[in-house]
Amino acid sequence: MCSKLVTDLPESTERIAAWTEQLCLIPGLSGYEDPVREYISDQFPDPRIQRHVDAPGNLILTLPGTDPAAPKVMIFAHLDQMGLIVRRIDEDGYLRVERVGGVPERVLPGLNMIVLNDRGQALPCVVGTKAHHATPQEEKGKVLGVDKLYFDLGVDSAEAVAKLGIQIGAPITYRPQFGRLQGQRITGTALDDRAGCAALMELLHTLLKSPAPATLHAVFSVQEEFNLRGAMVAAQRLKPDAAISIDIMVASDTPDLHDRGELKLGGGPALGLYSFHGRGTLNGTLPHPALLNHLSATGRAIDMPLQRSAHSGCLTDSSYVQLTNEGVPSMDVGFPARYTHMPTEVCDLSDLSAIARLLAAALQDMPAGFSFERRRYGCIC
Ligand SMILES: [Zn+2]
């Protein structure tokens, strides 16, 4: 998909758009985030930033605050995207797959995908499905499980697949794409969470120019789509005073989701009041009241509209970060996104730049002695 940057947007918005575009175009299945991480690390050569990459591959960029006694806050966005992995190679050259993360099976047939070979090259493939002209009426409305699908590289034998450097375990993602819609709307294959990574990069960029008393640990985390626990490892190392996740939140401004909530694209950053995932992962995040109060008050102070999300069916890695060490005050800050986990996710650049501004203002107003004591929400705002 071609992308054409419009020029009448603020510089920060254009920067976020350019970073998001570049990040969406780099494939990075869970466990294969290395090129995404390297791109981000290369964008921040500033010697004030301390950098660390841990064993799972989290990138930690620490910008020390101006006051060593002020809080240390971990703000994180995940590098990885969901996809598939090769589980079997048929004699006639078709690939059979397993899902890695929440890939919607109903969107797969007929899609363009890429598979990475053992040299790291991205090879195109398409998801095979029974030819439409040969599909009986009763099968036309059915969703095929991933075990019924076959991936077509354009070769006719297992030997030819092996020659391409593709073996069992090879990672597969949507064919990377990014595009601009009207205004500040963008679409891409992995806005979840490359757009969040771009917002976090913009936060770091902002604090380099306008330092805050608080220390920022910007963590670009791994394996969120796979097991939600990559960011835990960074939190165990950093022992932050607080932690905030930047990730998608499901927008409810499409015709089919009005009843789910009130989250609109372009309506501003969303505060996560509740997330819960009951299917296999009995976890979720309830915001720490000190953080919730502080971000709410910051939004009012800078005259920024904020939205609220209380949503079951999804969760982020903050669910696990909050349980590390002796517990970390945590919450989710989201950007509304449509068509989540589809190859054509849509979000709004204004929400991303607003997240960077909100969190920068929140850290700039977090001096030494800032209290993370639990108080009833609404008491101190
Ligand atoms: Zn995500």
Image (cartoon, rainbow, N blue to C red):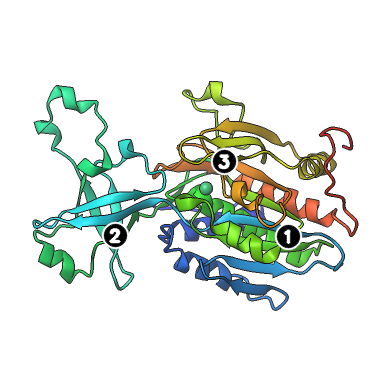
The amino acid type of the residue labelled 3 equals Asn
**Closer-to-camera residue (112/145):** 145
Give left or right: position of 305 versus 97: right
Q: Is disc 3 surrounded by few (<14), some (14 to 19) or many (20+) residues within 10 Å?
A: some
Is 214 above or below relative to 271?
below
**Closer-to-camera residue (315/39):** 315
Q: Which of the two discs, 2 and 3, labels the residue nearer the N terminus?
A: 2
Q: Secondary structure at mark 2?
A: strand
Mark 2–mark 1 Cα distance, whole angstroms, equals 37 Å
What residue did someone put label 3 on?
Answer: 283
Q: Is residue 14 visible?
A: no
Whole-percent x, y for residue 104 in the image: 36, 39
Please give the name of the residue rendered at 11% of the width and 67% of the height, measured from the top-left corner: 159
Mark 1–mark 3 Cα distance, whole angstroms, equals 21 Å
Mark 2–mark 3 Cα distance, whole angstroms, equals 32 Å
Quadrant of the rendered image containing residue 339: top left
Quadrant of the rendered image containing residue 229: bottom right
What residue did someone put label 1 on?
Answer: 240
Q: Which of the two discs, 1 and 3, labels the residue nearer the N terminus?
A: 1
Q: Which mark is residue 115?
A: 2
Q: Secondary structure at mark 3?
A: strand
